[in-house]
Amino acid sequence: MSARAQFAARRLAPALVAALVAGVLAVAHPGPLADLDLAAHDAFVRQTPPPPASPAVAIVAVDEASLEVHGQWPWPRDVIARLVTALHQAGAAAIAFDILFPEPDRLGTLSMTPGGPTSTDAALAAAMRDARVVTGVALTFEPSPGAAAPCVLSPVSPVVRHRDNDDPLAGLFTATGAVCSVPVLGQAARATGTINASPDGDGVLRRIPVLTHYRGQVQSALALTAVAVASPAPIVVERRSDGAVALAVGTRVVRLDPQGQILLRPRGPGRTFPHLSARDVLAGTVPPEALRGRIVFVGATALGVRDIVATAVDPRFPGVELHATVADALLGGASAERPPAARLLELAGPVAGALLGAALVAWLGGTGGAAAALAAAAVAWFGLRGWFAASGALVSPVSTIAGLALGALAGVAGALAFERRRANTELGRREQAQRLIVQTLTTLTETRDADTGRHARRTQEYTRLLATSVAARGAYRDYLTPHRIDLIATLAPLHDIGKVGISDAVLHKPGQLTESEYAEMKQHTTLGHDSLRKAEALAGVHDNEVLNLAKDIVFTHHERWDGSGYPQGLRGDAIPIPGRIVAVVDTYDALVARRAYKEALPHEQAIGIIRDGRGTHFDPVIVDAFLDCHARLREAEHAADVRLAPPGR
C-alpha cells in the first residue's frame, strides 16, 4: 500500500469505526441513550415558548376556598348536582369530571320536596341528565381474582379503518378492571372517559392513554370523550405505515403511539388554562362568558385532596390540567408527536454525525475540530428544538450529538486520547462516589430491618402531612415553607440512621431493654449525627441546608418539650422544628406498627397517647396539628399501594 493510501486509511479508519459504533448504538438504543432522549424531550418542552392556552377549555377547581365554604371533601352529591346545574346554565359545552363517584352518597339527606329526587345520588343524576356530563373511569391493570364490580361504560366509539388486515388498535393497553361511578350516575351521564395516566420509569409523566381496551371494547380518555360530547364529530383511527396510530377528530389529526398514547405538551407549570373556583360557580359570581361554549373539567386542587403528577415543566402539575391539555391538542391546539420520519432521522443522524465529527477533527486538528463538532451539535439541538417549537414534531437530537462526539473523539490521537480517558475515568469515579454517599444516606437504615422500607415510606408521608398541617395552623408558617416541608419529609426516613451502630442483640431484642441496653439504644441519635457531621467534613461542605436539616432530625427527634429527652435534654423552642415534627410521627408509627416485641396499638389508642404527651413530650402546636390530620395519616399507608394506571414505559 502506498504512503498516500496509508495516510488516507489512517484518516478514514477513525471515521468509519466511529460511524459503525454510532450506527450500532442507534439501532440498539441502550438504556442510557433512552434516558437522555427523555431528558431532551423535557428540555425541548421547557425551553420552547409555551403554546397559547385554548379558549375552548376551562377548569373548575375544588380548591381551598371551596372547602372553606362547603366543607371538607367529599361533598354531598346534592352540592355536586348544584355545581352541574350551574355549569349547564352557564352554557358549558361539556362537563367532564376528573373525580370518581364509586360508592353511593352517605353524606347527603333525602329530599323533602314532593316529587323531587329521593336521594342526593338521584339529585345528581337528574342534574346530569339535563347537561352534557362525562364521568371519569379509572381502569386497573393488575390481575383481579374476584368478579368485576358493576360498571356503566359509554365511551366514544371510533370508526376503525383497517389497512392490509392490520388492526390499528391491536397494541393498546388492555385493562383487567375498572373503577367507575355508581350505576345511577353512570346511566345519567352522557358518556364516560378514562382518567388513567402512567409516568415513565423516572417518575415523569410524558404521555397519556387516549384509547384503551377493556371488556372487548375501546375505552376513550376523558379528554377525547369530552371533546366528542361538546361538538359531535366523526372520530376515526387507523394505523400508519410507521406503526403509529392516527386519530382523527373531525378535521384534526393527532398521532398516537402504537399503544394509543398521546405525547403531552404542557403549556406551563400549571394554571395555564382558566381556573375557576367551584365556590364562585356555586355562588353565581362567575361571568357567563367564562364558561359559555367551553369544555369544563372539574377536579380537586385543594391541598390534601388534589391529584398531582410530575411533568417536564412542573413536578407538582395539577392532575385535572392533564385532561385539559389533551383536550386542547384534540381541538387543534399545539401538540407534540413523533413525525413519520423520526426513527429514520434518529438512525441516520448518528452515522452522519460520526463521519462529520471525525472529518472536522482531521481537517481542523483536535481543538478546532472539537469546537466545530460542538457547533454542529448545537445546530442539531437548536434545529430540532426549533422544529418542535414550530410544529410539535419530536425528534431526539441525542443520537446525532452522540455520533458527533464519537466522531470527534475518534479523531483525537495518542496522548490526548489517553489524557481524555484518564480524565473521564476520574470524573466517573467522583460521580460514582457522590452517588454512593447519597445512596448510603438514604438506604443505610434498610440494611438492619426488612420492614424499614415501608416504615420509611410511612414516616415520609406522615411527616409531609403533619408539617403541612402545622403550617396551615400558622404558628410556624414562615419556617415551614413548601420547599422546607418537602425537604423535611424527604429527610425524615434518615432519623434512625444511627441504629446501624447499635448491636444486633439490642436492636433486635424481642423483650424489654435493660437499663444498660436502653442507654446503648439512645446512642443512635449521637451516632447518626456524628456520621453526617463527619461526611460533611470529609466532603468539604459547609452550612448546607439539606445536611443541616438532616442533622437536626437525626440528633433531636428524641428530645422532649419538657427537657426530659435525649441526647442533650433540650427544652421547648430550643428543639429544632424538624426534630419536633419527626418526634410525633416516629412515636405514632412506633405505636401503630407491629414490632417483634409488641403488637400494634389501635389508631385511637395511639392518638390518645400522643394527646396525653401534649406539652410534656411534644410541642403543643404540633400535637394540635396532628389531631387535625390524624385521619389522613391513617390512610397514608394504603394510599401508597393504589395502582390504577398502566405500567410506566
Image: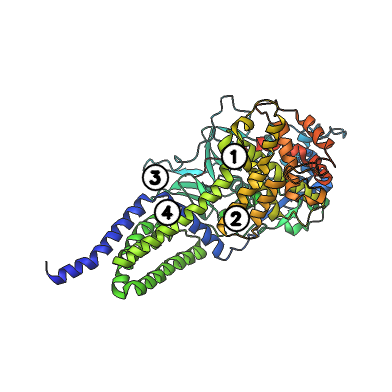
User: What residue is shown with label 4?
Assistant: 33
Q: CA distance from mark 2 to mark 4?
A: 33 Å
What residue is at 78 percent from the left and 56 percent from the top? Answer: 286
Image coordinates for residue 324, horizontal then vertical, percent: 63, 52
Image coordinates for residue 19, horizontal then vertical, percent: 30, 60
User: What residue is shown with label 1?
Assistant: 500
Local packing at callout 4 (Cα closer than 10 Å; few below 14, some 14-19, many 20+) is some
If you read the primary sequence from the N terminus, does the residue marked by circle 3 or circle 1 appear first?
3
Please name the amino acid that badge 2 sits on: Glu
If you read the primary sequence from the N terminus, does the residue marked by circle 1 or circle 4 appear first?
4
Local packing at callout 1 (Cα closer than 10 Å; few below 14, some 14-19, many 20+) is some
Local packing at callout 3 (Cα closer than 10 Å; few below 14, some 14-19, many 20+) is few
Q: Is residue 235 left or right of residue 114?
A: left
Q: Which color scheme does this rendered protein use?
A: rainbow
Residue 208 seen anywhere in this rendered image of the structure: no
Q: Is residue 92 left or right of residue 41?
A: right
Q: Give the structural element (helix, strand or loop) at label 3.
A: loop
Quarter residue 190 falls in: top right
Which circle marks residue 536 in the picture? 2
Please name the amino acid that badge 1 sits on: Val
Front residue of 210/503: it is: 503
Please name the amino acid that badge 4 sits on: Leu
Image coordinates for residue 91, horizontal then vertical, percent: 73, 52
Please name the amino acid that badge 3 sits on: Arg
Which residue is outermost to the left?
1
User: What residue is shown with label 3?
Assistant: 163
Q: Give the structural element (helix, strand or loop) at label 2.
A: helix
